[in-house]
Image (cartoon, rainbow, N blue to C red):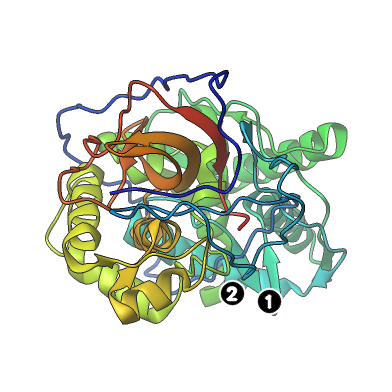
Amino acid sequence: MLCALILPLTANSVFATTDITTNVSDQGSGQNINNITEQTEKQIAQQTAETQTKQQTQTTQPTIEKKQTQQTAATNNEQVTTKNSSEQNIAAGSTLSATTAYTSVSFTSSQINDAASRVKTFIDTNHRLPGYVTISTTQVSLPQFLQLLTDNLININSGLVTSVTMKNVNNPSNPVETISSGNIYKSDYITIAQTIKTAIANNGAAPDYVNTTLGKMRYESLIYTLSKILSYQNTNQRLPIYVSVTPWTAGGSEGSSIPSSMQQYLVPTANCPSTNPTITSLAASITSGLTTQYSKATAIFNWVRDHLSYSYYYNTKKGALGALSSRTANCCDTSHLVVALSRAAGIPARYQLGNCQFSDGWFGHVWAQLYVNGKWYYADAISDSNTFGAINNWKLSNFTLRGTYASLPF
């Protein structure tokens, strides 16, 4: 299975390997469900919207292809800007990270409370944070959502029902937690909210943790705990006397242990619509009955590998939905489907671009990687000889890595 790349490859090219674990035993998953115990809360619909993150990148001629063919040159200007053949792809060898565009907008107290209810339901169901939250028509990042929760809670406690303006808030750097299970009472969770507000104002970023009466509460726990409090407010029109909490990683929940730096690999993009009903329905069907991230990732990889045949063309042409509909795709669109289904299942997924040595020569190639249990696994579904975490149709020991992407730029 070969790929063609219209980019000169000389005898002086340097080849490198990547350090990625390909064989790790499967692990069990746990649950992380906390409850506000004062009263029963109403059930909110389980769907939470996630945002699309745009990456700003310039490309010149990343024309990519694969599989069994001797064709090494073709012209395809769909979704890519073609320039002189002497120019090189400036994205080669770089790692692009997704960023969230900041929009100055205000939300009402009831809008924030409604979003808190939806986030609580999402976490209770999926045991992880959503990638993003949609409030009204605005896509809000999780650090920004924490700021909205905090300001709204403080306002409500002060008897104010006023709108809250969203700020530009960065991700925390290294969340840690030492909290033990127990109850946090109203006076204490208001103090927690005030501490978060001060940290955001001083640092422009969500805090890694906040000291509480039960120990250090990490960033993810702060979002969940404040979402539960405002979800209760949304149902009962008053704040709870106390909220029950347990450690975020209690029970070894794999989804909840996904670090905040991986959230960029869970969001949908134009060619990877991981929140599309067709994609989410298929992902749920493929992973039905499976309880670990590893088993889900393996099942998704196997499904794409076994249900798609290969078509020869350059770059992205169909996206994940087109590949699924036609059941045939090149390496780019096959990877789009792997990534979309994985993200829909709560598994961080990304793309890699490289010059790879197949049995009949060197070609440009794109493949997916999935993040499971703290490790990145290869997921190259173009060949029946490949398995999840293992590549056999090109030489993994000798290739040039040109780029790693949350969103494939061509």
Tell me the residue that label 2 is attached to. 114
**Residue drawn 74% across and 42% down?**
86
Task: Look at label 1 and name its amino acid.
Answer: Ser
Q: Nearer the viewer, residue 296 or 149?
A: 296
In percent of width and height, residue 334 lies at 36, 61
Return the x and y of residue 260 as percentages of the image width and height: 55, 39
Would residue 374 be found to the left or right of residue 402 on screen?
A: left
Q: Residue at x 18, y 42 (%)?
A: 387
User: Which residue occupies 68% across, 76% down?
Assistant: 110
Residue 45 seen in the figure: no
- Dot 1 falls on a residue whose secondary structure is helix
The label number, if any, that marks residue 110 in the structure image? 1
Question: Outermost residue, left direction?
Answer: 289
Q: Is residue 380 above or below residue 10?
A: below
- Mark 2 neighbour density, 10 Å: few (under 14) some (14–19) many (20 or more): some
Q: CA distance from mark 2 to mark 1?
A: 6 Å
Q: Are marks 2 and 1 in contact (CB under 8 Å)?
A: yes
**Of 277 and 3, which appears nearest the observer?**
3
Residue 331, compared with residue 192, is above or below; it is below
